[in-house]
Structures are given as structure tokens and as C-alpha cells.
Amino acid sequence: MKLSVTKDTLIGEILNTDQTTAPYFFEMGMHCLGCPSSAGESIEEACMVHGVPVQDLIDKLNYHMA
């Protein structure tokens, strides 16, 4: 199943679709992927908390998952 990531896409949805995306979250300093609250967090929320430009992560994830 192909997923198009947007700023509103939930982290859990991305990881459920493609677990090989985990390193992109680790790279931005998000090491709590197993935490239930992180699974319900949107890409935009995670980037805001970790100080990462949201569009950069969206582009990386969509390219990886294409």
C-alpha cells in the first residue's frame, strides 16, 4: 500500500505502512517511536517539537516510500 505523506499524516500510520522509515525519525532526534503517544502525533507536530523543517521530512519520506 502506497502512502502519500502530508503534514497531517500520523507517525503511526507511516510506520505501519513502511517500518523502514524509522531511521528518518531517529535522524531528527525522535527516538521514542515505540511510545503510544508518538504514534498518534502528526508529522507537523513531531517536527515542531524536534525543530525540524516539516517539508524536508515529508519530502524524504515520500521519496523513500515511492
Image (cartoon, helix red, strand yellow):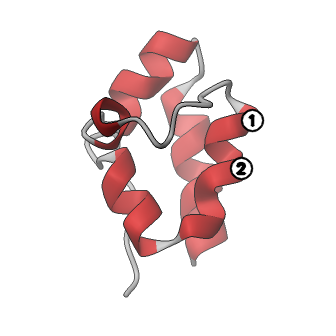
Element type at mark 2: helix
Which mark identifies residue 27?
Answer: 1
In this rendered view, identify the residue nearer to me: 35 or 43: 35
Residue that badge 2 annotates: 23
* CB contact under 8 Å: marks 2 and 1: yes
The answer to whether 36 is drawn above or below residue 60 in the figure is above
Q: Amino acid at mark 2?
A: Pro
> What count of labels does the image hold?
2
Crowding near pointer 2: few (<14 within 10 Å), some, many (20+)?
A: few
Closest to the observer, 32 or 14:
32
Residue 2 percent across, percent down from the top left = 40, 82
Residue closer to the observer: 50 or 30: 30
Q: Residue at x 34, y 40 (%)?
A: 7
Give the residue type that dot 1 points to.
Glu
The image position of residue 49, as x and y in percent, is 46, 12
Describe the element under mark 1 as helix, strand or loop.
helix
